[in-house]
Image (cartoon, grey):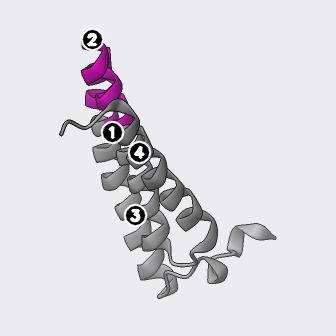
Amino acid sequence: MTIGLHQYLILSCLLFAIGFFGVLLRKNTLVVFMCLELMLVASTIGFVAFSRFNAAMDGNVFVFFILTVAAAEVAGGLAIIVALFRKRQTLMLDELDELKN
């Protein structure tokens, strides 16, 4: 049995929804960061699926750029998270509200 385009798109949508609601509902900075990465992976799956079923290389080029951006995001995001933890000794978003006022 072969997997069709709609199964890949359903998987992509489910992963994106999990990541989106994780960003909205979670309070831990690391978990929010992982949910953002999950959303990037979901969009990558969608691009690869469209590229495979349309016999085009455009989706693969987008995947390359998404992975490059994800690698840069991981490096910058984790550096910011480590700096925040060293300064505040917490990763909870509710306690990181100094710029609010």
Q: Residue furthest left?
A: 1
Q: Residues within 10 Å of mark 1 (few under 14, many from 20)?
A: many
Q: What's the CA distance linking mark 4 and mark 3?
A: 16 Å
Comes first in the chain, label 2 or label 4: 4
Contact (Cβ within 8 Å) of mark 4 with mark 3: no
Can you identify the residue that label 1 sits on? 45
Q: Residues within 10 Å of mark 2 (few under 14, many from 20)?
A: few
- Give, as a three-letter code, the residue at label 4: Ser
Q: Is residue 58 magenta?
A: yes
Which residue is rendered at x = 44% and y = 45% of the image?
Answer: 10
Looking at the rendered structure, which numbered label has been put on residue 34? 3
- Give, as a three-letter code, the residue at label 3: Met
Stretch of the chain drawn in magenta: 44-66
Residue 63 in view (yes/no)? yes
Comes first in the chain, label 4 or label 1: 4
Helix, strand or loop status at disc 4: helix
Q: Residue furthest front?
A: 1
User: Does residue 93 appear to the left or right of 62 in the view shown?
Assistant: right
Helix, strand or loop status at disc 1: helix
- Where is residue 25? Give x, y as percent: 62, 72
Contact (Cβ within 8 Å) of mark 4 with mark 1: yes
Q: What's the CA distance linking mark 3 and mark 1?
A: 17 Å
- Give, as a three-letter code, the residue at label 2: Ala
Can you identify the residue that label 2 sits on? 56
Q: Main secondary structure of the magenta part?
A: helix
Q: Is residue 87 magenta?
A: no
> Splitting the image into 4 quarters, where does residue 30 fall?
bottom left
